[in-house]
Image (cartoon, rainbow, N blue to C red):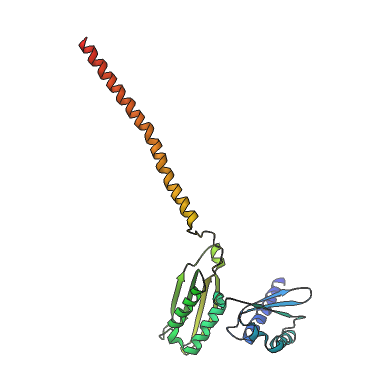
Amino acid sequence: MEEKKFVTFKKEELSVKEYIKKELGKGRISNVTIEYTPVGEKIIIGTSKPGLVIGRRGEKIDKLTNVLKKRFKLDNPHIEIKEITEPLLDAQLVADEIALLLERKGSLKFKVIAYKMLQEIIKTGALGTEIVLSGKLPSDRARTWRFTHGYLKKTGDPAKVVDVAQAQATAQSGVVGIVVKILAPDAHIHDRIDVNEELLNRIRVSVEEPEDLSEEQEKPEKKKRATKKAKVEDSEESKESKEKE
């Protein structure tokens, strides 16, 4: 019984998120987070266009709050707007933007749209990005096109820092699936190596030290050879003196 309640609760939460995204418009909302407090439900909406989401004098927010109370039976929903300063580093906003461009300009210009978006993402300072388009592009047979640039983690714990998002575009040829992955410039990567002056100095010191050690090792060998040579010469001289006698 507890599992069923949890599943129905998550379904209702997902329906609230989907309604907010659909109501406020595609390409404006990055993510919707719901936090439950003793006072009521706190709904955090991440967007790059807070003015369009709030509306004039907060009309859209008031309307959305009333709908959440009546339709979704929320007790006291409180909507909070979180502004995204770099929309090109947000994977969901980029995926929605690509979907809108494909719907406006058509699926035949998918390469121009993908490469242009790829360049804009890299210009903002992203370490790496990947755009995957799946669908009937440009022929009647479905294909998958991958556009990549830079450094991107695929597996393991470091892959968790990669921002991943999905979107869909309804074109004349059919539905096009869009997957966007972005590695932010401030992402913490454990196995990343920064080649700077300090690292280069360490490498130079480590390379020079073995040479000094080799020279020190050669010195005792030379001494051994000299002592052997002296012993041989002494033995030869002693033989010659004995023969003369």
Task: Using residue 231 as the reference point, say whether residue 166 is left or right of it.
Answer: right
The front one of 176 and 126 is 126
Task: Using residue 235 as the reference point, say whether residue 55 is left or right of it.
Answer: right
Residue at the extreme left of the image, as rendered: 244
The front one of 221 and 118 is 221
Picture quadrant of residue 243: top left
Residue lying at 50% horizontally and 86% vertically, measured from the top left: 101
Residue lying at 43% horizontally and 86% vertically, measured from the top left: 108
Please identify the quadrant where the N terminus is shown.
Answer: bottom right
Placement of 214 over or under 171, stated as above or below: above
Tell me residue 140's x, y (percent). 41, 86
Task: Using residue 145 as the reference point, say whether residue 13 is left or right of it.
Answer: right
Picture quadrant of residue 59: bottom right
Tell me residue 238's x, y (percent). 26, 15
Tell me residue 103's x, y (percent). 50, 88
Residue at the extreme top of the image, as rendered: 245
The front one of 110 and 134 is 110
Placement of 226 over or under 90, stated as above or below: above
Please identify the quadrant where the C terminus is shown.
Answer: top left
Tell me residue 32's x, y (percent). 65, 78
Residue lying at 50% horizontally and 68% vertically, measured from the top left: 127
Picture quadrant of residue 94: bottom right
Q: What is the count of numbered marks? A: 0
Residue lying at 44% horizontally and 75% vertically, measured from the top left: 146
